[in-house]
């Protein structure tokens, strides 16, 4: 009788173990099925979102292409009417162009001024040698001009540029050119009534304070209309410093819009124009008296 009960208990336990194993295996299979379904749902949603993003991207590409096509047409239109618009606006104006940076090209600015009827008697570029020259070189510079050794080199060079522009004294400029401090072209015939200072640099430099400010102050003191310009790409902008000297500025002089602004400013529409934070507006208002 005891043996039969023992077998019965073992049998019952075996049955329960088998049932437990079966339930466990079934639960595992069900959970795997649920995970697979969840993964399939997630993949489906991702594919749907990808399709939607692809459609959005295609639509944006089409829109960008349309805008680029319109921009190309607008540029063609502006470039077509620009020469006629500025023609004669600076007729009779004598403008000196002084470049205080070697980092950017301002050849198009000179061309635009001449297209507008201005005469440019001189173009002067002050090289980076001014900031790179050592003590002995600067002493030689001072000795040549009989200047005090403690005189600022930037002020001295600015003074010699002013003398050449206003009195045609180019002998000193020839020495500065031979010594590598400047590059100069033009015949310096006739004192200018306007000066365009072309600045801005790729890296932060003290050149603006050393040269540009003395130049601007001296030119304004002589009664010249002074305008400060730079290119859109100028990493180190001079515009804020120029504004503090109470002169008009154009920070996008390498563009047609900026060049139009420059011509208008030289025609009498004073202000600070361009695309940078220092500008008060993109360009002068047509037919207005300008900002003061």
Image (cartoon, rainbow, N blue to C red):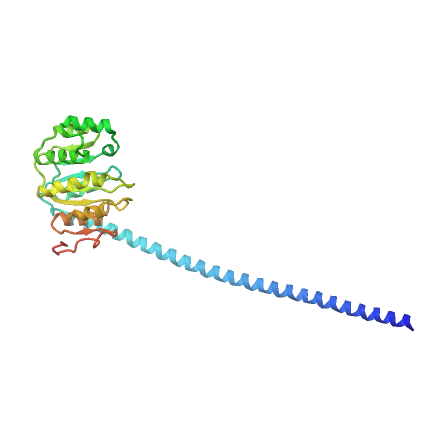
Using residue 134 as the reference point, say whether residue 60 is left or right of it: right
Residue farthest bottom in this picture? 1
Q: Residue 52: where, in percent of width, then height?
A: 45, 61
Using residue 278 as the reference point, say whether residue 145 is left or right of it: left
Q: Residue 78: where, in percent of width, then height?
A: 22, 51
179, above or below 222, in the image: above
210, above or below 248, in the image: above
Question: In the image shown, does 19 or 267 lie closer to the viewer?
Answer: 19
Residue farthest right in this picture? 1
Q: Residue 8: where, in percent of width, then height?
A: 85, 71
The quarter holding residue 225 reads top left
Number of numbered discs on residues: 0
The quarter holding residue 193 reads top left
The quarter holding residue 202 reads top left
Question: In the image shown, does 278 or 159 lie closer to the viewer?
Answer: 159
Quadrant containing the C terminus is bottom left
Residue drawn where x is 35% and y is 57% of the image: 63
Residue drawn where x is 8% and y is 37% of the image: 191
Quadrant containing the N terminus is bottom right
Question: In the image shown, does 112 or 266 lie closer to the viewer?
Answer: 266
Is residue 284 visible in the rendered image? The answer is yes
Q: Residue 44: where, in percent of width, then height?
A: 53, 62
Is residue 178 visible in the rendered image? The answer is no
Residue drawn where x is 12% and y is 36% of the image: 162
Question: In the image shown, does 136 or 278 lie closer to the viewer?
Answer: 136
């Amino acid at each position: 009788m005891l043996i039969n009960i023992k077998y019965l208990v073992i049998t019952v336990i075996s049955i329960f173990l088998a049932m437990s194993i079966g339930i466990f295996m079934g639960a595992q299979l069900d959970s795997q099925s649920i995970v697979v379904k969840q993964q399939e749902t997630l993949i489906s949603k991702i594919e749907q979102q990808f399709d939607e993003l692809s459609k959005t991207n295609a639509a944006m590409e089409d829109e960008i292409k349309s805008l680029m096509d319109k921009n190309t047409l607008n540029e063609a239109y502006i470039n077509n009417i620009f020469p006629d618009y500025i023609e004669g606006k600076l007729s009779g104006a004598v403008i000196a162009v002084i470049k205080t940076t070697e980092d950017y090209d301002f050849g198009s600015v000179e061309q635009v001024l001449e297209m507008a009827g201005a005469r440019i008697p001189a173009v002067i570029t002050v090289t980076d040698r001014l900031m790179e020259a050592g003590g002995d070189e600067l002493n030689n510079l001072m000795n040549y001009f009989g200047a005090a050794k403690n005189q600022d080199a930037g002020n001295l060079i600015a003074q010699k540029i002013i003398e050449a522009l206003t009195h045609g004294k180019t002998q000193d400029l020839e020495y500065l050119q031979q010594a590598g401090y400047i590059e100069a072209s033009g015949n310096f015939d006739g004192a200018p009534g306007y000066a365009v200072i072309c600045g801005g640099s790729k890296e932060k430099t003290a050149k603006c304070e050393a040269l540009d400010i003395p130049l601007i102050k001296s030119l304004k003191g002589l009664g010249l209309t002074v305008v400060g310009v730079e290119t859109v790409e100028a990493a180190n902008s001079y515009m804020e410093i120029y504004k503090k000297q109470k002169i008009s500025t154009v920070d996008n002089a390498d563009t047609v819009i900026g060049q139009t602004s420059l011509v208008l400013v030289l025609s009498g529409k004073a202000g600070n124009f361009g695309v940078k934070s220092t500008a008060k507006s993109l360009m002068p208002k047509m037919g207005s008296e300008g900002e003061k």
